Image (cartoon, helix red, strand yellow):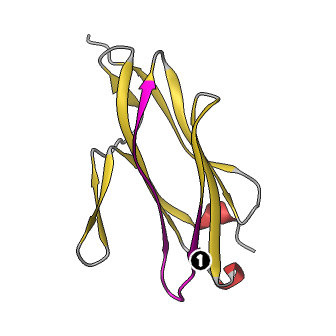
Amino acid sequence: MAHPKDKIRNVILCEDIRDEIGNKKSLMGVMAGDILVGEFPATLSVASYLEYVPDSEDGSEFSAEFRLLKGDSLLISGEIRAPIEPGKIVQLILPRGLAIFDAETSLRMLVSVKGGAEFEVFNKKISVATTS
């Protein structure tokens, strides 16, 4: 039995996600690696995109709960449900929101699939950029 964490693909943190024609998504301002800001406080636009690759063990419906955390403090939580269609991935999209960061911390997302154990899908350090 595959662990749900092994079925998550393409976990991407970005500034915005837009719908396009043909069931495509445009991801704007992709944040690779840790996040550098000019100074604190800093306001960031954040959105996230994940893909879940179901298999025969998943049945006909997908469900997941998520929590987006600033350090250990909850920013937002929610639940997603979607039908599972044979041969298709499930897209999990957390739409754009604003988050204010007052000091160095982390931005983390935790996911629980079908009521199972929660696991971390990303953890980004947020700090001030330094110049040499």
Viewer-side residue, 119 vs 64 = 64
Residue at position x 64%, y 68% in the image: 63
Residue at position x 68%, y 79% in the image: 58
At label 1, counting other C-alpha atoms closer than 10 Å, the crowd grade (few under 14, some 14-19, many 20 or more) is many
Q: Position of residue 122 (x, y in %)?
A: 53, 44
Q: Is residue 43 magenta?
A: no
Whether residue 85 is visible, yes or no, is yes
Q: Position of residue 10 (x, y in %)?
A: 44, 60
Three-letter amino acid code of the residue under disc 1:
Pro
Looking at the rendered image, the quarter that the C terminus falls into is: top left
The residue sitting at the left extreme is: 21
Residue 67 vertical position relative to residue 103 in the rendered view, above or below: below
Q: Position of residue 82 (x, y in %)?
A: 56, 74
Q: Is residue 95 magenta?
A: yes
- Relative placement, left or right, of 117 versus 77 is right
| Span of residues in magenta | 80-100
Residue at position x 27%, y 44% in the image: 29
Residue at position x 48%, y 15% in the image: 103
Kindly identify which residue carries mark 1.
54
**Helix, strand or loop under label 1:** loop
